Protein backbone atom coordinates (compact mmCIF):
# COMPACT_ATOMS: atom_id res chain seq x y z
CA UNK A 1 0.00 0.00 0.00
CA UNK A 2 1.57 3.28 -1.08
CA UNK A 3 0.06 5.29 1.72
CA UNK A 4 1.98 7.59 3.97
CA UNK A 5 0.70 9.28 7.07
CA UNK A 6 1.95 12.10 9.16
CA UNK A 7 1.55 12.28 12.89
CA UNK A 8 0.61 15.24 14.93
CA UNK A 9 1.15 16.44 18.39
CA UNK A 10 -1.52 17.52 20.84
CA UNK A 11 -4.21 17.58 18.17
CA UNK A 12 -2.29 19.86 15.85
CA UNK A 13 -0.02 19.21 12.91
CA UNK A 14 3.30 20.92 12.42
CA UNK A 15 1.63 23.14 9.86
CA UNK A 16 -1.41 24.05 11.91
CA UNK A 17 -4.86 22.57 11.91
CA UNK A 18 -4.48 20.38 8.81
CA UNK A 19 -5.57 16.77 9.16
CA UNK A 20 -2.97 14.05 9.35
CA UNK A 21 -3.06 12.98 5.79
CA UNK A 22 -2.57 10.09 3.47
CA UNK A 23 0.00 11.35 1.07
CA UNK A 24 -0.15 10.00 -2.44
CA UNK A 25 -2.93 9.43 -4.87
CA UNK A 26 -5.52 7.75 -2.66
CA UNK A 27 -8.11 10.21 -1.35
CA UNK A 28 -9.51 9.55 2.11
CA UNK A 29 -12.87 7.82 2.39
CA UNK A 30 -13.81 9.83 5.45
CA UNK A 31 -12.35 13.00 6.78
CA UNK A 32 -13.00 15.14 9.81
CA UNK A 33 -11.93 18.74 9.85
CA UNK A 34 -11.59 20.42 13.23
CA UNK A 35 -14.41 18.29 14.59
CA UNK A 36 -15.55 19.31 18.06
CA UNK A 37 -18.49 17.87 19.98
CA UNK A 38 -20.28 18.69 23.18
CA UNK A 39 -22.78 17.10 25.55
CA UNK A 40 -24.41 20.19 27.01
CA UNK A 41 -21.54 22.29 28.32
CA UNK A 42 -19.10 19.39 28.42
CA UNK A 43 -16.72 19.26 25.50
CA UNK A 44 -16.14 15.69 24.33
CA UNK A 45 -14.09 16.34 21.20
CA UNK A 46 -11.63 19.15 20.56
CA UNK A 47 -10.85 20.01 16.93
CA UNK A 48 -10.13 16.52 15.70
CA UNK A 49 -8.81 16.59 12.14
CA UNK A 50 -8.20 13.17 10.65
CA UNK A 51 -8.25 11.48 7.26
CA UNK A 52 -9.48 7.89 7.24
CA UNK A 53 -8.05 5.78 4.41
CA UNK A 54 -10.38 3.74 2.18
CA UNK A 55 -10.52 -0.08 2.24
CA UNK A 56 -8.57 -0.22 5.45
CA UNK A 57 -9.29 -0.61 9.14
CA UNK A 58 -8.66 2.42 11.30
CA UNK A 59 -8.73 1.88 15.06
CA UNK A 60 -9.57 4.65 17.48
CA UNK A 61 -8.00 4.04 20.87
CA UNK A 62 -7.85 6.01 24.09
CA UNK A 63 -8.89 5.87 27.73
CA UNK A 64 -12.53 5.96 28.77
CA UNK A 65 -14.04 9.37 28.26
CA UNK A 66 -11.49 10.43 25.65
CA UNK A 67 -14.23 10.94 23.07
CA UNK A 68 -13.63 7.97 20.80
CA UNK A 69 -17.24 6.74 20.77
CA UNK A 70 -18.44 10.31 20.35
CA UNK A 71 -16.07 10.68 17.40
CA UNK A 72 -17.51 7.53 15.84
CA UNK A 73 -21.08 8.73 16.36
CA UNK A 74 -20.31 12.10 14.78
CA UNK A 75 -19.22 10.31 11.61
CA UNK A 76 -22.70 9.01 10.81
CA UNK A 77 -24.72 11.72 12.53
CA UNK A 78 -25.71 9.62 15.53
CA UNK A 79 -24.30 12.19 17.94
CA UNK A 80 -26.98 14.72 17.06
CA UNK A 81 -29.68 12.28 18.25
CA UNK A 82 -28.62 12.79 21.87
CA UNK A 83 -30.47 15.54 23.76
CA UNK A 84 -28.24 18.55 24.35
CA UNK A 85 -25.51 17.26 22.05
CA UNK A 86 -23.96 19.46 19.39
CA UNK A 87 -20.96 19.50 17.14
CA UNK A 88 -18.81 21.86 15.09
CA UNK A 89 -16.46 21.26 12.23
CA UNK A 90 -16.82 19.10 9.16
CA UNK A 91 -17.26 15.42 8.37
CA UNK A 92 -16.61 14.57 4.73
CA UNK A 93 -17.52 11.31 3.04
CA UNK A 94 -15.77 11.05 -0.33
CA UNK A 95 -15.14 14.77 -0.01
CA UNK A 96 -18.81 15.68 0.53
CA UNK A 97 -20.10 17.04 3.83
CA UNK A 98 -22.29 14.47 5.57
CA UNK A 99 -24.06 17.21 7.52
CA UNK A 100 -25.34 18.63 4.24
CA UNK A 101 -27.00 15.30 3.40
CA UNK A 102 -30.14 13.51 4.54
CA UNK A 103 -29.14 11.80 7.83
CA UNK A 104 -30.92 8.57 6.90
CA UNK A 105 -28.98 8.39 3.66
CA UNK A 106 -25.75 9.06 5.56
CA UNK A 107 -26.49 6.22 7.96
CA UNK A 108 -27.14 3.84 5.07
CA UNK A 109 -23.74 4.73 3.59
CA UNK A 110 -22.05 4.64 7.01
CA UNK A 111 -23.34 1.65 8.97
CA UNK A 112 -22.73 1.04 12.64
CA UNK A 113 -22.29 -1.91 14.98
CA UNK A 114 -22.44 -1.42 18.72
CA UNK A 115 -20.69 -2.89 21.75
CA UNK A 116 -23.67 -4.98 22.80
CA UNK A 117 -25.35 -7.05 20.14
CA UNK A 118 -28.80 -5.53 19.79
CA UNK A 119 -30.94 -7.67 17.48
CA UNK A 120 -34.58 -6.62 17.42
CA UNK A 121 -35.94 -8.93 20.16
CA UNK A 122 -39.26 -9.77 18.54
CA UNK A 123 -37.85 -10.41 15.08
CA UNK A 124 -36.53 -13.55 13.43
CA UNK A 125 -32.97 -13.79 12.16
CA UNK A 126 -34.30 -13.14 8.65
CA UNK A 127 -36.38 -10.16 9.72
CA UNK A 128 -33.48 -8.67 11.66
CA UNK A 129 -31.29 -8.63 8.57
CA UNK A 130 -34.15 -7.44 6.38
CA UNK A 131 -35.06 -4.60 8.74
CA UNK A 132 -32.62 -2.13 7.24
CA UNK A 133 -33.81 -2.93 3.75
CA UNK A 134 -37.44 -2.46 4.73
CA UNK A 135 -36.57 0.88 6.39
CA UNK A 136 -34.95 1.80 3.08
CA UNK A 137 -38.24 1.13 1.32
CA UNK A 138 -37.40 -2.18 -0.33
CA UNK A 139 -40.48 -4.39 -0.39
CA UNK A 140 -39.75 -7.03 -3.05
CA UNK A 141 -39.62 -10.36 -1.14
CA UNK A 142 -37.19 -11.97 -3.60
CA UNK A 143 -34.82 -9.03 -3.45
CA UNK A 144 -35.02 -9.05 0.34
CA UNK A 145 -34.37 -12.82 0.53
CA UNK A 146 -31.35 -12.51 -1.71
CA UNK A 147 -29.98 -9.60 0.30
CA UNK A 148 -30.53 -11.47 3.58
CA UNK A 149 -28.62 -14.53 2.37
CA UNK A 150 -25.84 -12.41 0.90
CA UNK A 151 -25.53 -10.37 4.09
CA UNK A 152 -25.50 -13.44 6.34
CA UNK A 153 -22.79 -14.93 4.13
CA UNK A 154 -20.76 -11.72 4.21
CA UNK A 155 -21.10 -11.70 8.00
CA UNK A 156 -19.83 -15.32 8.09
CA UNK A 157 -23.04 -16.43 9.79
CA UNK A 158 -24.93 -18.15 6.97
CA UNK A 159 -23.49 -21.63 7.49
CA UNK A 160 -24.50 -21.54 11.13
CA UNK A 161 -28.09 -20.28 10.66
CA UNK A 162 -29.22 -21.32 7.18
CA UNK A 163 -31.62 -23.91 8.65
CA UNK A 164 -32.87 -21.50 11.32
CA UNK A 165 -33.44 -18.11 9.73
CA UNK A 166 -37.03 -18.04 11.01
CA UNK A 167 -35.97 -18.46 14.63
CA UNK A 168 -35.76 -15.35 16.85
CA UNK A 169 -32.52 -13.45 16.51
CA UNK A 170 -32.17 -13.52 20.28
CA UNK A 171 -31.95 -17.35 20.21
CA UNK A 172 -28.38 -17.05 18.89
CA UNK A 173 -25.25 -16.98 21.02
CA UNK A 174 -23.67 -13.61 21.88
CA UNK A 175 -21.06 -13.90 19.15
CA UNK A 176 -23.67 -14.97 16.59
CA UNK A 177 -25.94 -12.10 17.63
CA UNK A 178 -23.08 -9.67 17.03
CA UNK A 179 -22.50 -11.14 13.56
CA UNK A 180 -26.26 -10.91 12.98
CA UNK A 181 -26.05 -7.21 13.76
CA UNK A 182 -23.13 -6.92 11.35
CA UNK A 183 -25.24 -8.72 8.71
CA UNK A 184 -28.06 -6.27 9.38
CA UNK A 185 -25.64 -3.36 8.90
CA UNK A 186 -24.24 -4.93 5.72
CA UNK A 187 -27.69 -5.54 4.17
CA UNK A 188 -27.94 -1.96 2.92
CA UNK A 189 -24.45 -2.14 1.40
CA UNK A 190 -22.75 0.56 3.43
CA UNK A 191 -19.46 2.00 2.19
CA UNK A 192 -18.16 2.48 5.72
CA UNK A 193 -18.74 0.35 8.79
CA UNK A 194 -18.29 1.90 12.23
CA UNK A 195 -17.73 -0.60 15.01
CA UNK A 196 -17.93 0.53 18.63
CA UNK A 197 -16.08 -2.11 20.68
CA UNK A 198 -17.79 -4.89 18.72
CA UNK A 199 -16.08 -7.74 20.55
CA UNK A 200 -15.76 -6.42 24.08
CA UNK A 201 -18.58 -8.65 25.36
CA UNK A 202 -17.46 -11.76 23.50
CA UNK A 203 -15.25 -14.72 24.37
CA UNK A 204 -11.93 -15.21 22.51
CA UNK A 205 -13.40 -17.59 19.91
CA UNK A 206 -16.31 -15.30 19.06
CA UNK A 207 -13.87 -12.37 19.09
CA UNK A 208 -11.64 -14.23 16.64
CA UNK A 209 -14.58 -14.70 14.27
CA UNK A 210 -15.42 -10.99 14.39
CA UNK A 211 -11.77 -10.13 13.72
CA UNK A 212 -11.61 -12.57 10.79
CA UNK A 213 -14.75 -10.94 9.47
CA UNK A 214 -13.26 -7.46 9.78
CA UNK A 215 -10.26 -8.68 7.80
CA UNK A 216 -12.54 -9.91 5.00
CA UNK A 217 -14.86 -6.88 5.01
CA UNK A 218 -12.10 -4.32 4.65
CA UNK A 219 -11.45 -5.63 1.15
CA UNK A 220 -14.72 -4.05 0.09
CA UNK A 221 -15.36 -1.27 2.59
CA UNK A 222 -13.76 1.15 5.01
CA UNK A 223 -13.89 0.20 8.68
CA UNK A 224 -13.46 2.40 11.72
CA UNK A 225 -13.31 0.51 15.00
CA UNK A 226 -13.27 1.82 18.54
CA UNK A 227 -11.56 -0.55 20.92
CA UNK A 228 -10.19 -0.64 24.43
CA UNK A 229 -8.23 -3.72 23.57
CA UNK A 230 -4.72 -2.75 22.46
CA UNK A 231 -3.96 -6.20 21.13
CA UNK A 232 -7.15 -6.17 19.10
CA UNK A 233 -6.24 -2.81 17.57
CA UNK A 234 -2.77 -4.16 16.79
CA UNK A 235 -4.25 -7.29 15.21
CA UNK A 236 -6.98 -5.85 13.03
CA UNK A 237 -6.16 -2.22 12.27
CA UNK A 238 -4.02 -0.88 9.46
CA UNK A 239 -4.03 2.58 11.02
CA UNK A 240 -4.55 3.71 14.58
CA UNK A 241 -5.56 7.05 16.04
CA UNK A 242 -4.98 7.81 19.72
CA UNK A 243 -7.40 10.22 21.36
CA UNK A 244 -6.87 11.75 24.77
CA UNK A 245 -9.18 14.23 26.50
CA UNK A 246 -11.02 14.78 23.23
CA UNK A 247 -7.87 15.59 21.25
CA UNK A 248 -6.17 13.58 18.57
CA UNK A 249 -2.70 12.93 19.90
CA UNK A 250 -1.24 10.67 17.24
CA UNK A 251 -2.31 8.94 14.04
CA UNK A 252 -0.06 6.51 12.27
CA UNK A 253 0.23 3.09 10.76
CA UNK A 254 -0.67 0.66 13.51
CA UNK A 255 2.67 -1.14 13.43
CA UNK A 256 4.55 2.14 13.81
CA UNK A 257 2.29 3.47 16.54
CA UNK A 258 2.66 0.32 18.60
CA UNK A 259 6.36 -0.19 17.94
CA UNK A 260 7.67 3.37 18.09
CA UNK A 261 5.03 5.95 19.01
CA UNK A 262 6.19 9.49 18.47
CA UNK A 263 4.28 11.05 21.33
CA UNK A 264 5.06 10.41 24.99
CA UNK A 265 1.34 10.41 25.81
CA UNK A 266 0.76 7.59 23.32
CA UNK A 267 3.73 5.64 24.69
CA UNK A 268 2.46 6.03 28.24
CA UNK A 269 -1.05 4.96 27.29
CA UNK A 270 -0.25 1.90 25.21
CA UNK A 271 2.31 0.64 27.71
CA UNK A 272 -0.14 1.05 30.59
CA UNK A 273 1.88 3.74 32.37
CA UNK A 274 -1.10 6.08 32.68
CA UNK A 275 -2.60 6.94 36.01
CA UNK B 1 -13.32 3.55 34.36
CA UNK B 2 -12.27 0.49 32.42
CA UNK B 3 -9.05 -1.45 32.78
CA UNK B 4 -5.76 -0.01 31.60
CA UNK B 5 -4.87 -0.91 28.03
CA UNK B 6 -2.18 -3.43 28.84
CA UNK B 7 -4.03 -4.66 31.91
CA UNK B 8 -4.51 -3.57 35.46
CA UNK B 9 -1.94 -1.49 37.36
CA UNK B 10 -0.94 -4.76 39.04
CA UNK B 11 -0.25 -6.29 35.63
CA UNK B 12 1.78 -3.24 34.63
CA UNK B 13 3.73 -3.70 37.87
CA UNK B 14 4.39 -7.33 36.98
CA UNK B 15 5.66 -6.31 33.54
CA UNK B 16 7.84 -3.61 35.07
CA UNK B 17 9.25 -6.16 37.51
CA UNK B 18 9.98 -8.56 34.65
CA UNK B 19 11.70 -5.81 32.66
CA UNK B 20 13.82 -4.93 35.69
CA UNK B 21 14.92 -8.54 36.02
CA UNK B 22 15.66 -8.62 32.29
CA UNK B 23 17.76 -5.49 32.58
CA UNK B 24 19.78 -6.92 35.48
CA UNK B 25 20.39 -10.19 33.65
CA UNK B 26 21.41 -8.36 30.47
CA UNK B 27 23.91 -6.30 32.45
CA UNK B 28 25.34 -9.49 34.02
CA UNK B 29 25.53 -11.15 30.61
CA UNK B 30 27.39 -8.17 29.14
CA UNK B 31 29.78 -8.12 32.11
CA UNK B 32 30.43 -11.85 31.74
CA UNK B 33 31.13 -11.45 28.02
CA UNK B 34 33.54 -8.61 28.73
CA UNK B 35 35.21 -10.66 31.49
CA UNK B 36 35.59 -13.54 29.03
CA UNK B 37 37.50 -11.27 26.61
CA UNK B 38 39.72 -9.94 29.42
CA UNK B 39 40.50 -13.44 30.68
CA UNK B 40 41.12 -14.78 27.17
CA UNK B 41 43.47 -11.90 26.39
CA UNK B 42 45.26 -12.30 29.72
CA UNK B 43 45.66 -16.03 29.16
CA UNK B 44 47.11 -15.38 25.70
CA UNK B 45 49.41 -12.61 26.91
CA UNK B 46 50.83 -14.88 29.62
CA UNK B 47 50.31 -18.17 27.78
CA UNK B 48 48.57 -19.29 30.96
CA UNK B 49 46.29 -22.29 30.43
CA UNK B 50 44.76 -22.04 33.92
CA UNK B 51 43.35 -18.61 33.06
CA UNK B 52 42.28 -19.97 29.67
CA UNK B 53 40.30 -22.65 31.49
CA UNK B 54 38.41 -19.95 33.39
CA UNK B 55 37.11 -18.64 30.06
CA UNK B 56 35.44 -21.98 29.43
CA UNK B 57 33.63 -21.74 32.75
CA UNK B 58 32.55 -18.18 31.99
CA UNK B 59 31.30 -19.28 28.56
CA UNK B 60 29.09 -21.89 30.19
CA UNK B 61 27.65 -19.25 32.52
CA UNK B 62 27.03 -17.00 29.53
CA UNK B 63 25.12 -19.76 27.77
CA UNK B 64 23.01 -20.55 30.85
CA UNK B 65 22.21 -16.87 31.37
CA UNK B 66 21.37 -16.47 27.69
CA UNK B 67 18.80 -19.27 28.02
CA UNK B 68 17.33 -17.65 31.12
CA UNK B 69 17.05 -14.30 29.36
CA UNK B 70 15.34 -15.94 26.39
CA UNK B 71 12.86 -17.53 28.74
CA UNK B 72 12.21 -14.22 30.51
CA UNK B 73 11.64 -12.51 27.16
CA UNK B 74 9.29 -15.28 26.03
CA UNK B 75 7.32 -15.02 29.27
CA UNK B 76 7.06 -11.24 29.06
CA UNK B 77 5.81 -11.39 25.47
CA UNK B 78 3.37 -14.23 26.15
CA UNK B 79 1.97 -12.84 29.38
CA UNK B 80 2.00 -9.09 28.85
CA UNK B 81 1.82 -8.44 25.08
CA UNK B 82 4.26 -5.54 25.45
CA UNK B 83 4.32 -2.63 23.00
CA UNK B 84 6.41 0.44 22.21
CA UNK B 85 9.57 0.87 24.32
CA UNK B 86 8.74 -2.23 26.40
CA UNK B 87 8.59 -4.32 23.23
CA UNK B 88 11.73 -2.74 21.81
CA UNK B 89 13.60 -3.47 25.05
CA UNK B 90 12.59 -7.13 24.92
CA UNK B 91 13.31 -7.69 21.22
CA UNK B 92 16.61 -5.81 21.55
CA UNK B 93 17.57 -7.94 24.54
CA UNK B 94 16.82 -11.11 22.59
CA UNK B 95 19.02 -9.98 19.71
CA UNK B 96 21.75 -8.72 22.04
CA UNK B 97 22.02 -12.05 23.81
CA UNK B 98 23.07 -13.60 20.50
CA UNK B 99 25.76 -10.96 20.03
CA UNK B 100 26.97 -11.30 23.62
CA UNK B 101 26.95 -15.08 23.35
CA UNK B 102 29.02 -14.86 20.16
CA UNK B 103 31.46 -12.54 21.94
CA UNK B 104 31.79 -15.16 24.69
CA UNK B 105 32.31 -17.87 22.07
CA UNK B 106 35.11 -15.89 20.39
CA UNK B 107 36.74 -15.39 23.78
CA UNK B 108 36.49 -19.16 24.27
CA UNK B 109 38.07 -19.70 20.86
CA UNK B 110 40.97 -17.44 21.84
CA UNK B 111 41.33 -19.43 25.08
CA UNK B 112 41.28 -22.65 23.07
CA UNK B 113 44.12 -21.34 20.86
CA UNK B 114 46.11 -20.43 23.97
CA UNK B 115 45.67 -23.97 25.31
CA UNK B 116 46.92 -25.39 22.01
CA UNK B 117 50.17 -23.40 22.07
CA UNK B 118 53.14 -25.78 22.23
CA UNK B 119 54.72 -25.60 25.74
CA UNK B 120 58.03 -24.38 24.37
CA UNK B 121 56.40 -21.75 22.11
CA UNK B 122 57.77 -18.23 22.27
CA UNK B 123 55.38 -15.53 23.42
CA UNK B 124 54.86 -13.07 20.57
CA UNK B 125 51.96 -11.18 22.12
CA UNK B 126 54.12 -8.24 23.18
CA UNK B 127 55.89 -8.13 19.79
CA UNK B 128 52.67 -7.63 17.91
CA UNK B 129 51.65 -4.15 19.12
CA UNK B 130 48.36 -4.21 17.20
CA UNK B 131 47.11 -7.17 19.21
CA UNK B 132 47.04 -5.65 22.73
CA UNK B 133 45.57 -2.51 21.20
CA UNK B 134 42.83 -4.61 19.61
CA UNK B 135 42.12 -6.19 22.98
CA UNK B 136 41.83 -2.77 24.63
CA UNK B 137 39.66 -1.36 21.84
CA UNK B 138 37.25 -4.29 21.73
CA UNK B 139 36.84 -4.34 25.52
CA UNK B 140 36.23 -0.62 25.42
CA UNK B 141 33.60 -1.07 22.68
CA UNK B 142 31.76 -3.75 24.65
CA UNK B 143 31.97 -1.48 27.69
CA UNK B 144 30.49 1.48 25.81
CA UNK B 145 27.56 -0.46 24.33
CA UNK B 146 26.80 -2.08 27.69
CA UNK B 147 26.77 1.32 29.35
CA UNK B 148 24.53 2.66 26.59
CA UNK B 149 22.11 -0.23 27.08
CA UNK B 150 21.95 0.30 30.82
CA UNK B 151 21.59 4.07 30.57
CA UNK B 152 19.24 3.89 27.56
CA UNK B 153 21.54 6.28 25.75
CA UNK B 154 21.60 6.23 21.96
CA UNK B 155 24.01 9.09 21.36
CA UNK B 156 27.10 7.37 22.71
CA UNK B 157 26.73 4.40 20.35
CA UNK B 158 25.66 6.01 17.09
CA UNK B 159 29.20 5.92 15.75
CA UNK B 160 30.28 2.45 16.82
CA UNK B 161 30.89 1.55 13.18
CA UNK B 162 33.40 4.39 13.02
CA UNK B 163 35.14 3.06 16.13
CA UNK B 164 35.13 -0.39 14.53
CA UNK B 165 37.06 1.00 11.56
CA UNK B 166 39.97 1.64 13.93
CA UNK B 167 39.85 -2.01 15.05
CA UNK B 168 39.80 -3.11 11.42
CA UNK B 169 42.90 -1.02 10.80
CA UNK B 170 44.62 -2.63 13.81
CA UNK B 171 43.66 -6.03 12.41
CA UNK B 172 45.30 -5.16 9.09
CA UNK B 173 48.42 -3.95 10.93
CA UNK B 174 48.57 -7.16 12.97
CA UNK B 175 48.07 -9.27 9.87
CA UNK B 176 50.91 -7.42 8.11
CA UNK B 177 53.19 -7.77 11.14
CA UNK B 178 52.54 -11.50 11.57
CA UNK B 179 52.92 -12.32 7.89
CA UNK B 180 56.08 -10.17 7.85
CA UNK B 181 57.60 -12.15 10.73
CA UNK B 182 56.48 -15.38 9.07
CA UNK B 183 58.07 -14.34 5.76
CA UNK B 184 61.41 -13.53 7.38
CA UNK B 185 61.23 -16.88 9.20
CA UNK B 186 61.34 -15.57 12.75
CA UNK B 187 57.75 -16.67 13.46
CA UNK B 188 56.67 -20.19 12.55
CA UNK B 189 53.61 -20.63 10.32
CA UNK B 190 52.00 -22.73 13.06
CA UNK B 191 52.18 -19.90 15.63
CA UNK B 192 51.62 -17.15 13.11
CA UNK B 193 48.33 -18.58 11.97
CA UNK B 194 47.18 -18.83 15.58
CA UNK B 195 47.92 -15.14 16.17
CA UNK B 196 46.09 -14.24 12.97
CA UNK B 197 43.08 -16.21 14.17
CA UNK B 198 43.17 -14.40 17.52
CA UNK B 199 43.25 -11.05 15.72
CA UNK B 200 40.39 -12.19 13.52
CA UNK B 201 38.32 -13.19 16.56
CA UNK B 202 38.95 -9.83 18.21
CA UNK B 203 37.91 -8.09 15.01
CA UNK B 204 34.67 -10.13 15.00
CA UNK B 205 34.03 -9.24 18.66
CA UNK B 206 34.23 -5.58 17.65
CA UNK B 207 31.68 -6.26 14.88
CA UNK B 208 29.28 -7.70 17.44
CA UNK B 209 29.76 -4.62 19.61
CA UNK B 210 28.74 -2.55 16.58
CA UNK B 211 25.61 -4.71 16.22
CA UNK B 212 24.75 -4.12 19.86
CA UNK B 213 25.25 -0.38 19.43
CA UNK B 214 22.81 -0.38 16.49
CA UNK B 215 20.28 -2.34 18.50
CA UNK B 216 20.57 0.04 21.46
CA UNK B 217 19.85 2.99 19.16
CA UNK B 218 16.72 1.16 17.95
CA UNK B 219 15.70 0.28 21.50
CA UNK B 220 15.99 3.87 22.71
CA UNK B 221 14.69 5.77 19.67
CA UNK B 222 12.90 3.26 17.43
CA UNK B 223 15.30 4.28 14.66
CA UNK B 224 17.10 1.70 12.53
CA UNK B 225 20.58 2.88 11.67
CA UNK B 226 21.52 2.33 8.04
CA UNK B 227 24.52 0.14 7.30
CA UNK B 228 27.28 2.24 5.73
CA UNK B 229 30.35 0.65 4.17
CA UNK B 230 33.67 1.61 5.71
CA UNK B 231 34.81 3.20 2.44
CA UNK B 232 31.72 5.41 2.37
CA UNK B 233 32.23 6.34 6.03
CA UNK B 234 35.76 7.48 5.34
CA UNK B 235 34.48 9.55 2.39
CA UNK B 236 31.84 11.17 4.61
CA UNK B 237 34.37 11.91 7.34
CA UNK B 238 33.74 11.59 11.08
CA UNK B 239 30.03 11.31 11.88
CA UNK B 240 28.41 13.43 14.51
Image (cartoon, coloured by chain):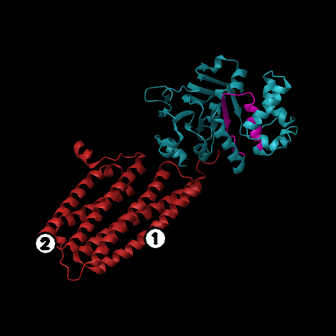
Q: Nearer the viewer, residue B92 or A138?
A: A138
Q: Range of the magenta residues?
A: A176-201
Give me the chain letter of mark 2: B
Instruction: Using the rendered image of the protein, determine whether residue B29 is visible from the camera's viewpoint.
Output: yes
Of helix, strand and loop, which one carries label 2?
A: loop
Q: Nearer the viewer, residue A210 or B85?
A: A210
From the viewer's perspective, tell me whether residue B215 is left or right of residue B15: left
Residue found 57% across the figure and 36% down from its top: A245
Residue B21 picture location, percent across and down: 48, 63
Which shade of the palette goes to chain B? red
Residue A32 picture location, percent across and down: 57, 26
Whichever of callouts 1 and 2 sits on the residue coming sooner in the sequence is 1
- Report whether mark 1 lies on the same chain as mark 2: yes
Instruction: Give the spatial CA distance, label 1 vs label 2.
Output: 44 Å
Residue A113 picture location, percent across and down: 71, 35
Residue B25 picture location, percent across and down: 44, 65
Residue found 75% across the figure and 45% down from its top: A175
Quadrant for residue B80, please give it: bottom right
Which residue carries the number 1 mark?
B64
From the viewer's perspective, tell me whether residue A20 is left or right of residue B193: right
Q: Which chain is tinted cyan?
A: A
Residue found 86% across the figure and 36% down from its top: A124
Which residue carries the number 2 mark?
B185
Whether A192 is among the magenta residues is: yes
Amino acid sequence: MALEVRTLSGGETEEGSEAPTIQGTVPPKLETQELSAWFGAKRALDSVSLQIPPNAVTAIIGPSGCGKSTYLRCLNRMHELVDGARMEGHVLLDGQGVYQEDPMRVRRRIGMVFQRANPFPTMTIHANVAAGLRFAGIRNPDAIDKAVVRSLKRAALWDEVKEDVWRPGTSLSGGQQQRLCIARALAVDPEVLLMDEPASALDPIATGKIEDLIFELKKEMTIVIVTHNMQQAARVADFTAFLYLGKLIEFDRTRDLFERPKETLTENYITGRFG
Amino acid sequence: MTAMPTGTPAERKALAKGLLKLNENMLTLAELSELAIRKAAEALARLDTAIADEVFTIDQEIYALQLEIEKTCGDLIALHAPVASDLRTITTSLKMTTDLDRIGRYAKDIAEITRQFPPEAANWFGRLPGLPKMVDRTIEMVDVVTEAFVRRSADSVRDMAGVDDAVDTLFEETLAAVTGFMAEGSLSADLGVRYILVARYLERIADHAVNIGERVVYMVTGERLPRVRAAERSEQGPSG
